[in-house]
Image (spheres, rainbow, N blue to C red):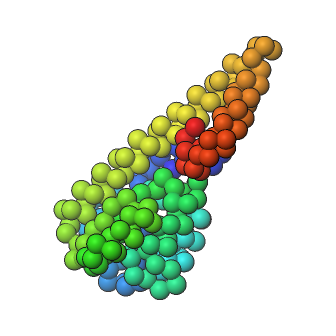
Amino acid sequence: MNQSRGRTVPNTKDQFPKILIADDEESHRALLTEILGVERYQIVHAKDGEEALELLEDGEVDLVLSDVMMPRRSGFAVCRSLKSNPDTRLIPVVLVTSLSASEERMQGIESGADDFINKPVNKEELLARVRSLLKIKQFTDELEHAETVLFALALSIEAKDPYTEGHCDRLSQCSEALAKRLSLTEEERTAL
């Protein structure tokens, strides 16, 4: 994905999706890489949660596969950080876990995880979930890009007419004031 004023735009057709695998065990990273190797994905590795967040800051990633239990920062914490950042909140996160208790799954859902994969990993299930989430991510990126283009067109059109110049900005300011008055959440304000 390319960044355009804090927003992602779709990969060009000659690029392959980039997947970040975060796991403290080399053997698990190698297994996931081998399974995903049948597809044409770019794979990057992180050996703990801190390294995963550094890689996410440095580069464009389309999907994160993260172990839950890692040193320095858990998969839950990585997911929370990712989902609370406007620039990375739309990146799908799959938590790879051996945890089966519903309490841990609830913690994963609350942290913003998009999906779960149980260890030991089933090859077909992993590939199907990754393909599905990458397709959703692509559609979301295309919508974000279309929104950016439409907003740019609206600004261009209003700049040509002195009567409507600044209308989009005024409308945005009024919407923001209304959202504050209604005590909307940050997510609801962003949607508005």
Residue at position x 44%, y 72% from top?
Answer: 76
Whether residue 42 is visible to the viewer of this picture, yes or no, is no
Hey, which residue is sitting farthest front in the picture?
182
Reply above or below: 187 against 100.
above
Residue 14 location (% of width, % of height): 43, 46
Residue 83 location (% of width, % of height): 51, 60
Reply above or below: 65 against 5.
below
In this figure, what is the number of numbered marks?
0
Q: Is residue 2 found left or right of 69 in the rendered image? A: right
Q: Is residue 153 found left or right of 165 in the rendered image? A: left
Residue at position x 31%, y 66% from top?
Answer: 116
Whether residue 115 is visible to the viewer of this picture, yes or no, is yes
Towards the viewer: 83 or 18: 83
Picture quarter containing residue 191? Answer: top right
Towards the viewer: 167 or 94: 167
Residue at position x 35%, y 68% from top?
Answer: 106
Reply above or below: 29 against 151.
below
Of the 4 image quadrants, the one containing the C terminus is top right
Residue 135 location (% of width, % of height): 35, 47
Residue 78 location (% of width, % of height): 49, 71
Residue at position x 51%, y 50% from top?
Answer: 1
Q: Is residue 16 found left or right of 51 in the rendered image? A: left
